[in-house]
Image (spheres, grey):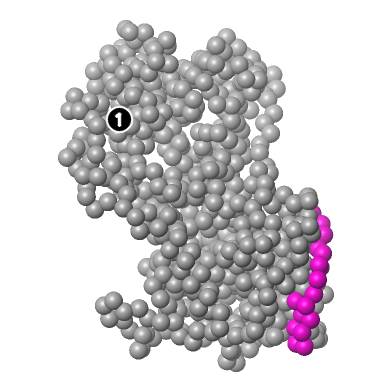
């Protein structure tokens, strides 16, 4: 029905030429310029348009960590590239997997188990009535205190049940009005053409704004430990918006479509994947794959709401595949900087595969519009493609359509809450990230049940936080020293030993009283784990009391510490890309500790020591590496909310319980008077290992 790609014809470009969008409607230029302004702001703030050590052309100014992590993350992303449909090769295999995959996706955005559907308390605060349509200004609570502000557009005259559209908006900043008001031309079109259309504000750009950029700006890394992403709130609000629509007497619950662009396009994929009440979808510029996000670093342009926590190591297009075999239209602009066409073609090819398996080839198509370089907006032809797609699949209507070209209302007139005094005092939108995903409440083991209790917790920890870890982490290998004329380095020729813990990933270790590949016999070896800024050449002052001069020991700078530090950038490419390939940086550091500890003393005993977060990294390494028989943690943090950061860990346990899992191994906690560690002590007591724990 729709052409897969429009012909360029006279829009073909020569060198330096930029194709102009066709048929600009009134208001389109404003939208386009706003979108371009947003992209330019992101472009310059994330390092695309500025020279930094990480992206400088001069190799002498590139840090070893930058080069290493770019290659490592690209390698890990490539491993996931072949995991579309989780490897299903037949329709029967896919159908058998689909319920599990749907649940995994819900877990990855923090919606499993699904929250309780509490009363919506929907309230209409005002109406605008025209000759042929009505706008209702309303709000509902998707959960108590989480307000969703919306405009509902419908025909004035209603005869029988009507098809409905839930329209999700992107990151247009309309301030106090909420960005639903920016999309009013779409609402008008649907109402004038016989639909009920609900447009609601997203969490970050609504009348009651919350936060979308927790890891993008690096202020809320605890989101990852909590298993929280704003995608969860947006998807839940979308589920409840459909609940609201089907509660209305004029809505046909069997004819509901979802559509949106950018963040709204991503949300179109989310809701279609998890809610089968969506019978038709049209997603514009809402998805790009891991090759694009990670290898080409496009994640630096994307808000946290655009991405799940990739707990299960998915190939990203699998999310969209959960829509099949329902009709799905994928739209993109050929010059969209944030959604490159190369990724769009890969995604389209994968989706054609799943729709072909269902024998529903015509139910998926892609549509490419053309615009200026960097265009990230609706164009007249992309809007009409959406209208035609929804008309065809919800109404069986294949007549030609016109663009949404209407006189607009003043945006203030579409507010749900007209004045600031009308805003609800009990709204939790700006703090919902603190409570939306429940934190685990861990009961202590009953007497005699420590082993079963520990095995259950470790199993859940492996499933939700460390699923990419093997049963035992492979031992590290000695690696050749990098070419120091290529990278900015401080290391001397007589400096630390270089070891590889994963393919292409280097860490640095200094050996004291040890000869490489000749571990001491019948002696314990100590491994000291460093935090950023701690010296690699000598034993840190805080560690000296626990390592005698005669005791063989090694000092480890895990990934990102010391010689392998990477350039810090806004949008936190390395840290966020780690999550897209299935772990956090700190989880990678746990891997490094375990990989270095294993060969350090053959199969002999190893004691691991660290301060603050590095101490907790060592303790977790002991959970996965049996050769680590003892752990010393100096100045232990009380909660993963402050780090170290592991995916979903607070949905399983917190630091005091994790330390308790080490029983009956020896554990020393230094400067650990906080009452949180009373739980660790009690766990050791119930494990019958009270004498193995010291608190100094």
Where 589 sits versus 598, above or below?
Answer: below
Q: Quadrant of residue 101?
A: bottom right
Residue 344 seen in the figure = no
Where 303 sits versus 320, above or below?
Answer: above
Q: Quadrant of residue 187?
A: bottom right
Q: Which residue is mark 1?
A: 508
Residue in the image at 53% along x and 60% along y: 319
Q: Confirm whether the magenta stretch covers residue 132.
A: yes
Task: Report x, y in % for residue 189.
Answer: 65, 83
For the residue carrying disc 1, how many other residues have a C-alpha within 10 Å: few (<14), some (14-19), or many (20+)? many
- Farthest residue in the bottom direction? 399
Q: What are the residue bounds of the magenta stretch?
A: 116-135
Task: Report x, y in % for residue 424.
Answer: 78, 55
Task: Report x, y in % for residue 463.
Answer: 54, 41
Q: Quadrant of residue 226?
A: top right
Horizontal relation, residue 111 to residue 297: left or right:
right
Quadrant of image for the C terminus: top right
Total residue callouts:
1
Q: Nearer the viewer, residue 123 or 226?
A: 123
């Amino acid at each position: 029905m729709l052409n897969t790609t429009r012909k360029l014809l006279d829009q073909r470009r020569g060198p330096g030429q930029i194709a102009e969008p066709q048929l600009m409607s009134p208001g389109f230029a404003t939208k386009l310029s706003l979108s371009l302004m947003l992209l330019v702001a992101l472009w310059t703030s994330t390092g695309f348009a500025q020279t930094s050590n990480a992206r400088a052309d001069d190799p002498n100014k590139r840090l070893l960590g930058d080069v290493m992590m770019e290659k490592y993350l690209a390698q890990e992303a490539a491993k996931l590239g072949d995991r579309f449909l989780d490897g299903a090769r037949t329709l029967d295999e896919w159908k058998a997997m689909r319920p599990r995959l749907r649940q995994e996706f819900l877990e990855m955005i923090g919606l499993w188990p699904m929250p309780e559907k509490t009363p919506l308390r929907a309230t209409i605060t005002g109406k605008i009535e025209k000759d042929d349509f009505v706008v209702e200004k309303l709000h509902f609570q998707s959960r108590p205190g989480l307000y969703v502000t919306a405009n509902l557009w419908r025909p004035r005259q209603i005869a029988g049940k009507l098809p409905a559209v839930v329209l999700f908006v992107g990151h247009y900043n309309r301030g106090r009005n909420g960005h639903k008001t920016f999309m009013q031309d779409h609402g008008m079109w649907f109402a004038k053409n016989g639909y009920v259309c609900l447009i609601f504000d997203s969490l970050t750009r609504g009348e009651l704004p919350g936060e979308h950029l927790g890891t993008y700006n690096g202020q809320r890394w605890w989101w990852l430990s909590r298993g929280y992403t704003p995608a969860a709130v947006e998807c839940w609000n979308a589920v409840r918006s459909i609940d609201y629509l089907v509660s209305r007497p004029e809505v046909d619950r069997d004819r509901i479509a979802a559509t949106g662009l950018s963040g709204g396009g991503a949300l179109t994929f989310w809701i279609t994947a998890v809610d089968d009440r969506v019978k038709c979808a049209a997603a514009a510029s809402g998805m790009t794959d891991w090759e694009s996000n990670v290898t080409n670093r496009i994640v630096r342009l994307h808000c946290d709401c655009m991405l799940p926590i990739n707990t299960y190591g998915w190939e990203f297009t699998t999310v969209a595949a959960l829509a099949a075999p329902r009709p799905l239209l994928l739209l993109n602009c050929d010059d969209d900087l944030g959604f490159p066409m190369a990724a769009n073609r890969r995604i389209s090819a994968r989706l054609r595969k799943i729709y072909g398996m269902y024998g529903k080839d015509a139910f998926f198509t892609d549509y490419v519009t053309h615009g200026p370089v960097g265009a990230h907006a609706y164009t007249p032809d992309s809007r009409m493609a959406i209208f035609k797609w929804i008309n065809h699949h919800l109404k069986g209507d294949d007549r030609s359509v016109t663009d949404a070209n209407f006189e607009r209302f003043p945006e203030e007139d579409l507010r749900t809450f007209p004045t600031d005094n009308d805003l609800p005092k009990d709204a939790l939108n700006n703090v919902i990230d603190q409570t939306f995903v429940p934190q685990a409440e861990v009961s202590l083991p009953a007497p005699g049940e420590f082993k079963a209790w520990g095995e259950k917790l470790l199993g859940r920890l492996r499933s939700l936080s460390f699923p990419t870890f093997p049963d035992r982490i492979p031992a590290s290998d000695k690696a050749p020293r990098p070419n120091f004329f290529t990278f900015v380095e401080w290391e001397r020729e007589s400096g630390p030993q270089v070891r590889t813990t994963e393919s292409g990933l280097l860490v640095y270790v200094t050996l004291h009283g040890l000869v490489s590949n000749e571990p001491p016999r019948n002696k314990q070896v100590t491994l000291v784990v460093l935090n950023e800024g701690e010296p690699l050449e000598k034993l840190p002052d805080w560690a000296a009391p626990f390592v005698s001069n005669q005791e063989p020991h090694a000092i480890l700078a895990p990934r990102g510490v010391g010689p392998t530090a990477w350039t810090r950038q806004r949008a936190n490419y390395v840290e966020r890309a780690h999550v897209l390939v299935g772990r956090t940086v700190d989880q990678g550091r746990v891997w490094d500790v375990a990989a270095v500890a294993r060969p350090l003393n053959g199969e002999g005993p190893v004691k691991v020591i660290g301060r603050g977060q590095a101490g907790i990294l060592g303790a977790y390494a002991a959970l996965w590496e049996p050769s680590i028989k003892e752990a010393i943690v100096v100045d232990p943090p009380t909660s993963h909310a402050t780090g170290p950061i592991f995916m979903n860990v607070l949905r399983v346990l917190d630091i005091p319980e994790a330390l308790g899992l080490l029983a009956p191994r020896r554990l020393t906690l230094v400067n650990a008077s906080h009452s949180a560690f009373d739980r660790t002590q009690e766990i050791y007591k119930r494990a019958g290992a009270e004498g193995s724990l010291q608190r100094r």
